[in-house]
Structure formats: structure tokens, C-alpha cells
């Protein structure tokens, strides 16, 4: 602290002054992040819009304006309608399942039981593993010929000629229209469950024990306490988990891409995977960008809901 | 109204003996206070009576029935927590109605009447539409009480309900609470660490320390006829003066330590030479801190002089102070238990 | 009576725990078994998939490590991860501190905007970013990923860290400033050391984020030697129509399990950060 006394007092004092100024430091600290984001997110975002309004492809790099042609041609296809419906189906069903399962899991994890550390470890595996690698496991588990699930079903007599799920020997999870969608949803639920459950558990733990004791004394049993006390009090954090999940799932393509490639045919296609196939694998950058842009209005609406929900976080 | 009884009640948390064998028996309609320093086990005892903790050993009886296996909601009790535990997401009306809903068997109209009845007793009818965060501490306490009353329980359990109120509010709240209890006549167990609260409100007080009940009695009994050193020193502010004499401890209260000239009856007195070191003028009383020389050396003593005693006392001076022999209390040096008076 | 009820409740809890553990871990447990299975054992539909009908073998592990670019993938992922973490920390720590302490109204708005950016999905940006990467000549290199990954790690870290910084009492910094430090020095000497555990947790999860990332890695890099684990394993070990299943499984499990172990340690910190960051003071 006595260093200040020494040489060049004036220069030092001035520098000190800068290092002290709240506003200046604030902006300086924030600047790199803002710049990075603006350049690598903001600019590409507008580029995406520009692309969608042009005819750019991997081969033809000139940006010739074509207006809304891309959008018009996309909407007409049946693939678009299917992809749009699938996207919504995928998101809504998956998220509802996640919330219900995650709440149950959080409730279970809030109890004491032996081997809790092991249970925690196993339960977060789907989240800890890179999603592409976890999905590979499911790829085999759901395989049309070698699925171990098929084997188990056969062994207990639910699959095979003359059985409930028969007559074939294989469920062909990823090859049948409805089942493929269900499988894809299931894997998405599987991967997002751990994080959601952990966050909801934190929410549950933040309920003061006094309130739960009071409810017990007041005569509330397990179900009444759950539905009238616990759930209302974690509703804010639950809605955040739900909305975040929706945003994430809506824009995600990994599970569909690795499990079914959008198949069979295009019955599990969702907007992001279609954008990838068209834009990157197919090289039609403009059309790909247009498809991807359909995501945006929905995401924006949900983002606004997230903000509103996070403002309501103060209940107590 | 029910009576509450505990037999050999114990609660151990691993090595820690939170409650170490408590035999308690309350009378019907009585206001029984559990008093003691923090960690003495009073809250654990209360929670076992409520059914929120399972006893390690012993029995809890409510209305003559052993209730160990019954969950809280089956015990017909009401409880008010230190934090009041109002459900933050419900209106005050819904808060008070909650136990009725849980109990079931009432129409919406019947519930409404009950809630309004409870609210009117506590004087909060006008607030019923609000939420807990919109009302003051004192009002929250009343809502908690209304919620407790609404089921017309047979037993009332309160865990330091006044500690979250500011000092001024506490005195009036104490008065209201006691009057309420009198009016409704419900057996009440009240936990506190504040002896003024305990003495002011309790019909009987159970003084607890290290998991055991040291003494149970009326405020008069435990103050004037303390059963052991702990009770004697815990009660009274400033605390009882203690001196060692042979193999026992002799105690006398500061208000019984007076200048010789003030005492009317001049026989049966024990005299001390009191060297005053400091005097505090508290308005209604004067506290004189000083030293008395004894066989074991100098002992610090406090005298409490009411304002009616106008004898001038100054720091640095020595005076003759006396204690009436009937006010001396003798305690065994090793066990701390009260013994017969010895020659002094 | 109550004892029976308690037993029933215990049973239900253990049952639910078993269900969730099985559901979550099944693919990994099963993958672990499969790694050592011989081909003839695996490709027989009649065989019990959970047992070794033929003795286990290390062949597939050998294939993974010596015949494929797996080790290269691991190295690439590590390299990218470390670099991205460093870049992110350099940018996000000051930004988070700024949001937590130094800015008022417009700072709150900047915070919300940062968080909103995080919500823009890669599947929207990857097409224009692909063109940007190509025109910068970074196509097919790991540098494209080093450049682009901070776009999602920075908002994530900033959001988490600002919650941690906020939880440190202002009093400590103010005491340091009264003692003679400038605001900048107070930050370095007081706030940083106290947030260390939070920062470590953020580092762990940021690294994991880069490890997991698939979309950009898939889009920008097609040359095998430049690929990350996340993309390399699913694509490389499928040659034509032939899946080298056991090696695939090995590749997945080798990465998944250590990450899960590390996660278990830092889980509490991360969740604290999520909830702290969300509840704006």
C-alpha cells in the first residue's frame, strides 16, 4: 500500500483513477464479451437472414437476391409440414415427460437412502457423457436386428409369433413411423432428465423445513403436501426448466441425426436436421438458412416467457 | 382438553443426547413453559410431542393414550413455529383454511365460517385477502395463531413464537397470547429461552438443561426455591450471587443484598463488608457491583437496590450489607442440588 | 401399522431409485459389457446380450487405439477444450464481474441480452458460420472450433459466474478499497480468490460443453485427423455399412465415465450457480 508514495506520483494517481472509475471499468470488462458475441453471433444471425433471401449455395457464392422464393418453395413441400409438426411434437411431448419424471426423481432424491452417491453417479451419466456417444449406445439397444431390448421381450414372451407385440421377432424401433418418433423422444428425455432433476432438487431443497413441518402438523398427507405446497413453491424454477428445455430441444439435432437421420423416409425429421441435410450435406445454403429461420419466431416467444417466469421467482 | 405426559423420553442423535430421560406431566388447560438455554433439548422435546421426531426411547401420551406411532396429523395438536411457517404462495384466508381442508368433511361455507371465527378472535378479519409477505411480523404471528386455533385442537405447541418480534411488540404480544389461552382454556406447551417470557406467562415452568428437566414448578417455586444451582443461576437478572463455604455453595439474590440500615428486622441477619466497584443507575433500580472478602478470596457480588432505597452508594467505598438468613440458599458443591441450611 | 407404512414407503423409494438408475445407466452398463464381446458372440441374435457367451477379448480396444484416429480425436478434444476454456475465462470473468457489480440499469439489460444470445441455437447459426469459417480459410481445422465455441461458452460462463460474484458481500471489496487498493486490485485480490471454487466448477462444465459439442464440429470439420471425439467416434467407426460396434462402445465409455465422475464432484456448485444466476437480486 505504500508503493503509491514513490516515483511519478502524478502518473500513478491518474492510472489509479482510471482503475477506480466504476463506469469505465464496467464497460471495459464487458467489452470483449460484447464484441465477441456481436461479431460471431449477431453478424451470422443477420447473414442467415441474408442467405435465406438469396440463392447462395456452396458452389455459387454470389449473393443474388431472390426475395421470399426460398420460403415459398419450402412451405409447399410435405416434408416441411412433417418437419414442423415433428418439431413441435418432439419438443412438447419430450418436455412434458421430462418435467413429470424430473419432479418425481427430484422428490425421490430428496429422501435419504443407502447408496445415494452411487445412484447420483448413475443418474447423471446421460448428461455427463457427450450426447453423441450416449446416443450410440441407444443406437444398438434399438437396433432392428440385434436389440437387447428385443431379446428381453422375447425371453419374457412378449415378442415373437403369437405374442402381444408379435408376430415379428423384432420391434424395429427405429424403422417404424410411430415407434421411431417415440424412440427419438425417449432418448431426448433420457439425456435431459439428469440436469432437470438436479435443478428441481435444488428447488425442492430450498423450501424451508418449517413449512413442511407445519403442513404435517396441519394434517396434510403426502399427496396434499406435494400438490398444494411443494409443487406451487417450485413452480417458478420448474417453468424455467421447462422453457429452457423447450428452447434447447427445439433447436437441437443430435439425437435425431444419429438415431434415424430423419427417417424412416422423413417421418422423424425435425427442422434443424432438415436444415442440416439441405444446407450442409446438400450444399443449398440459402434453403438451409431459410428452414432454420423458421425456428426463430418460436424461440423468441419462448424466450419472452422465460424472462417473465424468471421475474416471478420471488415468491417468499 | 387433553393432558400431555412423557415417560422416560429420550432422543439421541448418534453420540449427542438431545433429550436424556424426561418425565413430564401437564395438567388440563395449563400453560406449561419449557425453559432453558439453547441446546438444552426443549425444542427436540416439543418436536417429539408433535410427532416430528421419533423418540429413541420412552413414550409420549396425549389424553392418556400412547401416541408414539401416530403421525402429527393424527394427534389433534396445533403448532406454531418460530418462523410462523405461513405458506407464502397462499392468501391468509387459505393459510388458515388449510388445516380444515386437510381434515376434510366440511363444506366450503362451513370452512369459511370457521376461518372467520378464528380470524375474529385474533382481530385479523380485514387482512384475509392478503399474502404473507404483505403483512407485518405481529400480524403474521396472529395468522399463525388463527391457523392453529381453527381446528380446535386439544393441545397447543408453541416454539419461541415471540422471538421474531421486536422488543416493544413482544410485551403486548405476550399479554395477548396469555389472555387468549386463558379464554380458550387449551393445554399449551410453550418453548422459550427467555426467562422473562417464561415467568410472565407460565402456570408452571420446566427448566431444562442438557436434555433433562432440572426442576418443574410455578414461577415462584423455581425462583425462590430453586432445586439446584443451574436453575438458581439461570433465573434472575442479574444472576444469583454464589459463595463457597466449606463444602457447599451459598446463594442469595441481588435484591436480598441490602445496606444494613435499610433492613427493618435486625436479627437473623448475615453481615458482609461490601466494597463497591461500580454503580449502574437503571432508573427503577440501582445495581451495585462490588467485592466481598471471604475465606476463599474476593468474590464478586451484585446488589440490586430499588429506587425506594435512597441510601447513597458510591464506587470505591465499603459498606455493611446484610442478607436475611431466610433468604440464603444452600447447594451441594459437587452435585449442585439444594441442601439444608447450614450454619453460616 | 405405522411400521408397515414405513416399510412400504421405503420399498417405493428404492423401487423408484432402481428404475431411474436403470433407465439412466442402461446404455452405459451395457456398452461396457459389449466392449469386450467377440464378434461372433455379439452378432448372434439368440445369444444373451448381457453375458459373455464366448470369452471376452481386448481386440476391439486394440482396434480403437491402434487402427483408428481415436487417440487423435482425444487429443484434439483436449486441445480445443483447454484453449476454449482459457479464452472464455479471459473474456467471461471480467464480463461477469462487470454485470455483478459495476453496472446499473443498462447493465441488467446487457445481462439479459447476453443470456438471450445463449438461446440462439447453433442450428440457426451454423450455416452462415460455415461460410464465415470457409472464407477465413479455417475450414476443416480445429481452429474453426476454437474460434466458434466461445460463442456459447462465454454467455454460459458469464451467467454462472455473475451469480457467484454477486454472492460475495460488497463489504469485503469496500474494505479492501479503504485499505488502499484500487477497484481493479480489490477484484483481483479479494473477489477472485473467494470465487475460486465457483470458477473451477465453471471451468469443468465449460470444458465438458466443448467436449460434447456436435453440431459445429460436424459442420466445420470433415477431415478425420482434425475431428473431435464427439464427432469422430460416431462417424469414423462406421466404415460404409459396417459398424465397429464394440470399438464404438469403447470409444464412448472411455470418455463418458471419467466425465461423469468429475461431474459428481462439482454438481452442487453448478446447480448453486444456476439458481443464483436465475434469481436476479
Image: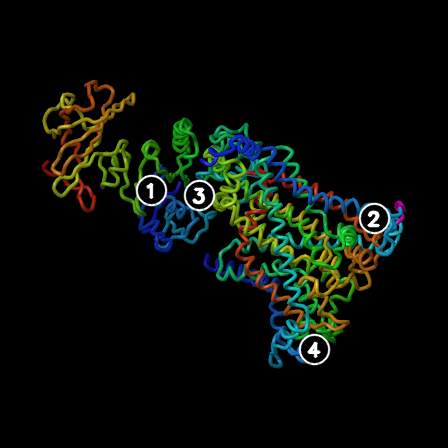
Judge depth for marks 2 and 3 and give the one in front. 2
Q: Is residue C37 visible from the viewing direction of this image?
A: yes
Residue located 11% across and 37% down the image = B295
Magenta extent: A65-69
Q: Looking at the image, do the residues carrying marks 1 and 3 touch, with CB atoms under 8 Å apart?
A: no
Horizontally, residue B201 falls left or right of residue A48, namely left
Q: CA distance from mark 1 to mark 2?
A: 83 Å
Q: CA distance from mark 3 to mark 4?
A: 66 Å
The answer to whether C256 is drawn above or below residue B338 in the figure is: below
Chain hosting mark 3: B
Residue located 55% across and 59% down the image = C262
Q: Residues within 10 Å of mark 1 (few under 14, many from 20)?
A: some
Q: Residue furthest front?
A: A7
The residue lying toward the viewer, choosing from A100 and A193, is: A193
Q: CA distance from mark 2 to mark 3?
A: 71 Å
Horizontally, residue C33 falls left or right of residue B181, namely right
Query: Circle 4 sits in a helix, a strand or a loop, which is it?
Result: loop
Image coords of residue B150 (percent x, y): 49, 37
Q: Which residue is mark 3?
A: B77
By secondary structure, the bulk of the magenta-drawn segment is best described as loop
Chain hosting mark 1: B
Q: CA distance from mark 1 to mark 3?
A: 15 Å
The residue lying toward the viewer, choosing from A61 and B270, is: A61
Q: Are marks 1 and 3 on the same chain?
A: yes
Return the mark for residue B26: 1
The answer to whether A58 is drawn above or below residue B191 in the figure is: below
Amino acid at each position: 500500500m505504500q508503493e503509491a508514495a514513490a516515483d511519478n506520483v502524478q502518473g500513478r494517481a491518474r492510472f489509479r483513477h482510471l482503475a477506480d472509475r466504476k463506469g469505465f471499468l464496467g464497460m471495459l470488462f464487458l467489452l470483449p464479451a460484447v464484441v465477441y458475441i456481436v461479431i460471431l453471433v449477431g453478424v451470422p444471425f443477420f447473414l442467415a437472414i441474408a442467405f435465406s433471401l438469396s440463392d447462395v449455395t456452396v458452389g455459387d457464392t454470389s449473393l443474388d437476391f431472390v426475395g421470399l422464393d426460398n420460403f415459398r418453395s419450402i412451405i409447399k413441400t410435405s416434408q416441411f409440414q412433417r418437419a414442423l409438426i415433428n418439431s413441435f411434437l418432439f419438443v412438447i411431448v419430450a418436455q412434458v415427460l421430462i418435467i413429470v419424471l424430473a419432479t418425481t426423481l427430484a422428490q425421490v432424491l430428496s429422501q435419504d437412502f443407502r447408496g445415494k452417491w452411487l445412484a447420483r453417479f448413475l443418474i447423471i451419466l446421460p448428461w455427463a457423457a457427450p450426447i453423441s456417444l450416449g446416443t450410440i449406445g441407444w443406437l444398438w439397444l434399438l437396433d432392428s436386428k440385434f436389440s437387447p431390448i428385443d431379446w428381453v421381450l422375447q425371453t419374457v414372451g412378449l415378442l415373437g409369433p403369437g405374442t402381444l407385440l408379435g408376430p415379428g421377432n423384432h420391434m424395429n424401433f427405429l424403422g417404424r413411423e410411430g415407434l421411431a418418433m417415440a424412440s427419438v423422444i425417449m432418448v431426448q428425455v433420457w439425456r435431459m432428465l439428469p440436469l432437470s432433476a438436479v435443478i428441481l432438487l435444488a428447488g425442492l431443497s430450498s423450501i424451508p423445513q418449517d413449512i413442511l413441518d407445519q403442513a404435517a402438523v396441519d394434517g396434510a398427507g403426502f399427496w396434499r403436501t406435494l400438490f398444494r405446497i411443494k409443487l406451487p413453491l417450485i413452480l417458478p424454477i420448474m417453468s424455467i426448466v421447462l422453457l429452457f428445455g423447450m428452447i434447447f430441444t427445439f433447436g437441437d439435432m443430435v439425437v435425431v441425426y444419429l438415431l434415424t437421420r430423419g427417417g424412416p423416409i422423413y417421418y422423424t425429421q425435425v427442422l434443424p436436421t432438415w436444415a442440416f441435410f439441405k444446407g450442409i450435406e446438400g450444399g443449398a445454403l440459402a434453403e438451409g438458412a431459410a428452414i432454420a429461420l423458421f425456428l426463430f419466431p418460436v424461440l423468441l416467444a419462448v424466450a419472452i416467457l422465460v424472462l417473465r417466469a424468471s421475474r416471478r421467482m420471488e415468491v417468499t | 382438553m387433553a393432558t400431555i405426559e412423557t415417560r422416560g423420553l429420550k432422543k439421541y442423535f448418534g453420540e449427542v443426547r438431545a433429550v436424556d430421560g424426561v418425565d413430564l406431566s401437564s395438567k388440563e388447560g395449563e400453560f406449561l413453559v419449557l425453559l432453558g438455554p439453547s441446546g438444552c433439548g426443549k425444542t427436540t422435546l416439543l418436536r417429539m410431542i408433535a410427532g416430528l421426531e421419533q423418540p429413541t426411547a420412552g413414550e409420549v401420551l396425549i389424553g392418556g393414550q400412547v401416541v408414539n406411532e401416530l403421525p402429527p396429523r393424527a394427534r389433534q395438536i396445533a403448532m406454531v413455529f418460530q418462523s410462523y411457517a405461513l405458506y407464502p404462495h397462499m392468501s391468509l384466508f387459505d393459510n388458515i383454511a388449510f388445516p380444515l381442508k386437510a381434515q376434510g368433511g366440511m363444506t366450503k361455507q362451513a370452512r369459511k365460517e370457521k376461518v372467520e371465527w378464528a380470524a375474529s378472535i385474533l382481530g385479523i378479519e380485514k387482512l384475509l385477502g392478503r399474502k404473507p409477505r404483505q403483512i407485518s411480523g405481529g400480524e403474521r404471528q396472529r395468522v399463525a395463531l388463527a391457523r392453529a386455533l381453527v381446528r380446535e385442537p386439544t393441545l397447543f405447541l408453541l416454539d419461541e413464537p415471540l422471538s421474531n418480534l421486536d422488543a416493544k411488540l413482544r410485551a403486548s404480544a405476550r399479554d395477548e397470547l396469555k389472555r387468549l389461552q386463558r379464554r380458550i382454556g387449551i393445554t399449551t406447551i410453550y418453548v422459550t429461552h427467555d426467562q422473562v417470557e417464561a415467568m410472565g406467562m407460565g402456570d408452571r415452568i420446566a427448566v431444562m438443561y442438557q436434555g433433562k428437566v432440572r426442576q418443574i414448578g410455578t414461577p415462584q417455586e423455581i425462583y425462590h426455591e430453586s432445586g439446584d444451582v443451574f436453575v438458581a443461576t439461570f433465573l434472575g437478572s442479574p444472576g444469583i450471587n454464589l459463595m463457597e463455604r466449606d463444602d457447599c455453595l451459598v446463594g442469595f439474590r441481588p435484591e436480598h443484598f441490602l445496606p444494613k440500615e435499610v433492613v427493618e428486622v435486625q436479627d437473623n441477619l448475615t453481615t458482609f463488608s461490601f466494597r463497591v466497584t461500580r454503580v449502574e443507575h437503571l432508573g427503577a433500580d440501582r445495581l451495585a457491583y462490588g467485592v466481598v472478602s471471604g475465606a476463599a478470596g474476593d468474590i464478586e457480588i451484585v446488589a440490586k437496590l430499588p429506587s425506594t432505597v435512597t441510601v447513597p452508594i458510591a464506587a470505591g467505598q465499603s459498606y455493611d450489607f446484610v442478607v436475611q438468613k431466610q433468604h440464603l440458599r444452600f447447594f451441594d458443591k459437587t452435585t449442585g442440588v439444594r441442601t439444608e441450611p447450614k450454619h453460616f | 401399522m405405522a411400521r408397515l407404512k414405513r416399510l412400504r414407503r421405503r420399498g417405493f423409494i428404492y423401487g423408484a431409485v432402481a428404475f431411474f438408475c436403470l433407465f439412466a445407466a442402461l446404455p452405459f452398463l451395457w456398452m461396457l459389457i459389449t466392449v469386450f464381446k467377440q464378434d461372433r458372440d455379439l452378432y448372434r441374435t439368440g445369444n444373451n446380450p448381457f453375458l459373455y457367451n464366448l470369452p471376452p477379448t481386448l481386440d476391439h480396444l486394440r482396434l480403437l487405439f491402434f487402427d483408428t484416429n481415436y487417440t487423435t480425436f482425444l487429443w484434439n478434444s483436449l486441445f480445443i477444450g483447454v484453449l476454449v476454456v482459457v479464452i472464455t475465462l479471459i473474456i467471461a470473468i471480467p464480463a461477469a464481474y462487470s454485470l455483478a457489480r459495476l453496472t446499473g440499469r443498462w447493465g441488467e439489460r446487457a445481462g439479459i441480452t447476453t443470456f438471450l444470445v445463449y438461446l440462439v441455437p447453433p442450428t440457426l447459426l451454423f450455416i452462415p458460420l460455415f461460410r464465415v469459417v470457409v472464407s477465413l480459410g479455417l475450414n476443416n481445422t480445429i481452429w474453426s472450433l476454437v474460434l466458434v465455441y466461445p460463442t456459447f461458452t462465454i454467455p454460459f460462463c458469464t451467467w454462472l459466474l455473475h451469480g457467484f460474484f454477486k454472492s460475495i458481500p460488497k463489504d469485503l471489496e469496500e474494505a479492501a478499497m479503504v485499505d488502499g487498493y484500487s477497484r481493479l486490485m480489490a477484484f483481483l485480490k479479494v473477489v477472485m480468490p473467494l470465487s475460486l471454487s465457483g470458477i473451477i466448477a465453471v471451468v469443468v462444465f465449460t470444458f465438458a460443453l466443448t467436449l460434447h459439442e456436435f453440431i459445429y464440429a460436424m459442420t466445420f470439420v470433415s477431415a478425420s485427423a482434425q475431428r473431435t471425439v464427439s464427432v469422430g467416434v460416431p462417424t469414423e467407426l462406421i466404415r460404409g455399412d459396417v459398424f465397429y460396434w464394440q470399438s464404438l462402445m469403447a470409444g464412448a465409455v472411455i470418455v463418458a465415465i471419467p466425465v461423469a465422475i468429475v461431474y459428481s464432484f462439482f454438481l452442487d456448485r453448478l446447480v448453486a450457480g444456476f439458481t443464483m444466476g436465475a434469481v436476479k437480486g
